[in-house]
Amino acid sequence: MSAQPIEPGPDVSYSRLRDMADDIIGALDRRGDRVRVDIANQEITVHMMSPSNPHGEIVFEVGFQIRTQDRDAVLLVENRVHHPGLGLCRSADLLAMSREARERQDDDFAFFAPDVSVAVEVVSSSNPGNDYITKLRDYPRMGVPEYVIIDPRNGTVTVHSGPDTASGEPRYADAPRHYKFGDAVPMGPWTVDTSAFPRYRAPRSRA
């Protein structure tokens, strides 16, 4: 997945950035390009999507297990989560929330971050910094209650929770909880068995 920032200019409103993001997505979609769009610091970043097979399998498995445990859970794949007051919008591999929280949403552009129960990201082998740095910085700023990082490169899962601003810099207050593939991992009010999660494999050369 590659990213291309677009700078619309100074003092552009978040509402205008949203409109521009939708225009970009629409134009690229008509060309057959699958993209995600993030907004931060009055800048739009376009991510060209090329998810691997393990990435898709893990996202599906997490969503399937949560839905099996809780028929009222709402699962959203490759959807946007935002905080308009901060001018922040990020695209998540998977968002999970309660039906009640879903019914509170009044914005089709993105889901209000504090209403989400958990955001899940499966680390891309080509751009791990987006999950370990960028989103780990912005999700607590936006008020996402819990952030789960699943890393198929080394077979680990890290759970961050408790957004807090006491230090002056928004971050997750709780010490991250570390798991390995094979563990039962609490994600929000649900628990996910990770024993079937695939790992990334080195590409094989074809003669």
Image: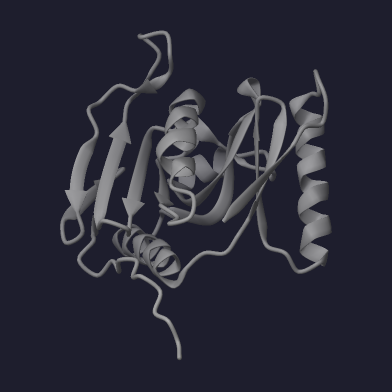
Is residue 9 depicted above or below 132 in this figure?
above
Give the number of marks: 0
Q: At x 32% / y 59%, what residue is drawn?
A: 152
Percent coordinates x, y for residue 168 in the rendering: 42, 8
Q: Position of residue 74 (x, y in %)?
A: 46, 53
Q: Is residue 191 visible?
A: no
Q: Residue 56: horizontal and vertical position, in percent? A: 45, 67
Where is residue 27, by image quadrant? bottom right
Could you tell me if residue 36 is visible in this image?
yes
Which picture quadrant has residue 133?
A: top left
Residue 156 lies, in percent from the top left, at 24, 52
Quadrant into which the C terminus falls: bottom left
| Frontmost residue, 83 versus 126 | 126
Q: Residue furthest left?
A: 183
Q: Nearer the viewer, residue 87 or 118?
A: 87
* Lateral position of residue 71 relative to residue 187, left or right: right
The coloring applied to the image is: one colour
Judged left or right of residue 21, residue 195 is left
Residue lying at 63% horizontally and 47% vertically, measured from the top left: 3
Q: Nearer the viewer, residue 136 or 103?
A: 136
| Direction from residue 75 to residue 155 in the image, left or right | left
Residue 176 located left or right of residue 92: left
Is 192 situated above or below 138? below
Where, quadrant-wise, is the N terminus in this rendering?
bottom right
> In the displayed structure, would residue 18 be above or below residue 56?
above
